[in-house]
């Protein structure tokens, strides 16, 4: 059992490690091809870890990435590709900002209300794709891509001055939210403030693990993702699980914009961060849909984002900060390849081990029924 556990851990870690090594190697080749030092950019970015303000920025960004990746991971575990996380969280953030600016309740009621609004909005938008898939067989990939574009148009319309828009200089906002809806942060002195919503993100990861691994619903969800026909044969309503997975994925996606909305901007505007949903796809892949793996992947992605600007100011030779973007893209490509290579290696290793056990059992076979039973038992494993 101990040997099996060690091997399982090795197989789980091998994929991300290989992907990172390959990404660093290929990025170094790009640097060499452009006549730049292939080592110094990494050294410059690693130096940023020691700065407390970069640490704060990294943690805050990682909290948003974590929630977006969890939303994607819920779909992945169900064998669904929810590309609509980007539209879901932006529409949820805009709706929440409007509600927060027009409704004022005591903080113990206001914050839960805003979180509920965000989750319901995200779930509603993802549910459209879920209903289309379960009733009409429309691919969730196509549906969510189209819904992203529609969400952008809805946001543009809702933020018009004639509706809920409030012009602030050259920016179009939804107006400042009431202070009772501001989520308190963790002060780090001159380094800034860590979003308090990061704690909610961590709790969401714990809940994700508990539901998937310790509940009947989580088992049904994973079983349906593995094989809808097999799950249906065991009494699971596959269509209901598909719709449920899309609703949960959308609800989690709705929370992705809350750390910065409730902890910093307190309004939705044209400058609100975009692209979290697509980043979440890469992070979920790197983290293998595991809440702990996703946490490390989120921190890595956020660190590359926040440390890369230092490359523009390097002396005596400046580097393009897009190096970090190249590395992120290469990580996504390498992840897919490395995971498949590790999977095949693990499968061949398992087959070889079973073959060795069968051969050993056959050598010890004296023709008795007991030994024959042993061979059958090993073969069954």
Image: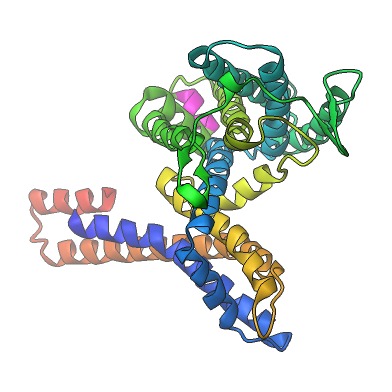
Residue 67 falls in image quadrant: top right
Of all residues, the one furthest to the right in this rendering is 162
Q: Give the answer, above or below, for where 318 lies relative to 246.
A: below
346 relative to 85 in the view: left or right: left
- Would residue 217 be seen by someone viewing this image from the given angle? yes
Residue 229 lies within the magenta run: yes
Q: Which of 346 and 269 lies nearest the eye of the viewer?
A: 269
- Would residue 341 be seen by someone viewing this image from the given angle? no
Q: Give the answer, above or below, for where 154 lies relative to 9.
A: above
Return the x and y of residue 228 as percentages of the image width and height. Answer: 54, 31
Residue 190 lies within the magenta run: no
Residue at x 68% of width, y 47% of height: 278
Of all residues, the one furthest to the bottom in this rendering is 35
Residue at x 25% of width, y 55% of height: 5
Question: How many marks overall?
Answer: 0
Residue at x 73% of width, y 31% of height: 268
**Secondary structure mostly seen in the magenta stretch:** helix
Return the x and y of residue 258 as percentages of the image width and height. Answer: 60, 32
Q: Give the answer, above or below, for where 342 lies relative to 212.
A: below
Residue at x 68% of width, y 84% of height: 317
Q: Which of 233 and 365 lies nearest the eye of the viewer?
A: 233
Segment tinted magenta in the rendering: 228-233
156 relative to 349 in the view: left or right: right
Residue 186 falls in image quadrant: top left
85 relative to 70 in the view: left or right: right
Q: Which of 88 and 272 lies nearest the eye of the viewer?
A: 272
């Amino acid at each position: 059992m101990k040997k099996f556990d060690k091997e399982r851990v090795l197989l789980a870690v091998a994929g991300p490690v290989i992907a990172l090594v390959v990404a660093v190697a290929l990025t170094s080749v790009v640097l060499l091809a452009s006549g730049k030092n292939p080592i110094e950019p990494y050294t410059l970015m690693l130096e940023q870890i020691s700065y407390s303000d970069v640490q704060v920025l990294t943690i805050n960004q990682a909290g948003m990435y974590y929630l977006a990746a969890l939303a994607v991971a819920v779909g992945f575990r169900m064998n669904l590709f929810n590309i609509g996380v980007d539209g879901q969280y932006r529409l949820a953030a805009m709706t929440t900002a409007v509600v927060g600016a027009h409704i004022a309740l005591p903080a113990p009621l206001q914050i839960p209300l805003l979180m509920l609004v965000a989750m319901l909005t995200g779930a509603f938008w993802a549910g459209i794709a879920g209903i289309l898939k379960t009733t009409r067989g429309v691919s969730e990939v196509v549906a969510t891509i189209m819904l992203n574009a529609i969400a952008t148009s809805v946001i543009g319309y809702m933020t018009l001055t004639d509706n809920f828009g409030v012009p602030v200089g050259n920016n179009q906002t939804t107006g400042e939210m009431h202070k009772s809806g501001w989520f308190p942060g963790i002060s780090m002195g001159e380094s800034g403030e860590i979003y308090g919503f990061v704690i909610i993100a961590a709790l969401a990861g714990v809940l994700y693990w508990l539901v998937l691994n310790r509940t009947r619903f989580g088992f049904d969800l994973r079983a349906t993702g593995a094989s809808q026909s097999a799950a249906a044969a065991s009494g699971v309503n596959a269509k209901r699980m598909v719709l449920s997975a899309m609703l949960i994925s959308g609800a989690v996606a709705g929370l992705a914009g809350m750390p910065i909305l409730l902890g910093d901007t307190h309004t939705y505007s044209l400058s609100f961060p975009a692209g979290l949903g697509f980043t979440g796809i890469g992070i979920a892949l790197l983290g293998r849909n595991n809440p702990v793996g996703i946490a490390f992947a989120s921190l890595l992605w956020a660190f590359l984002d926040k440390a890369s600007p230092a490359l523009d100011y390097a002396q005596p030779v400046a580097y393009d900060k897009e190096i970090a973007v190249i590395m992120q893209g290469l990580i996504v490509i390498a992840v897919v390849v490395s995971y498949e290579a590790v999977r095949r290696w693990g499968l061949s290793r398992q087959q070889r081990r079973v073959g060795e056990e069968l051969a050993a059992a056959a050598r010890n076979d004296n023709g008795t029924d007991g030994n024959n039973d042993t061979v059958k038992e090993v073969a069954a494993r």
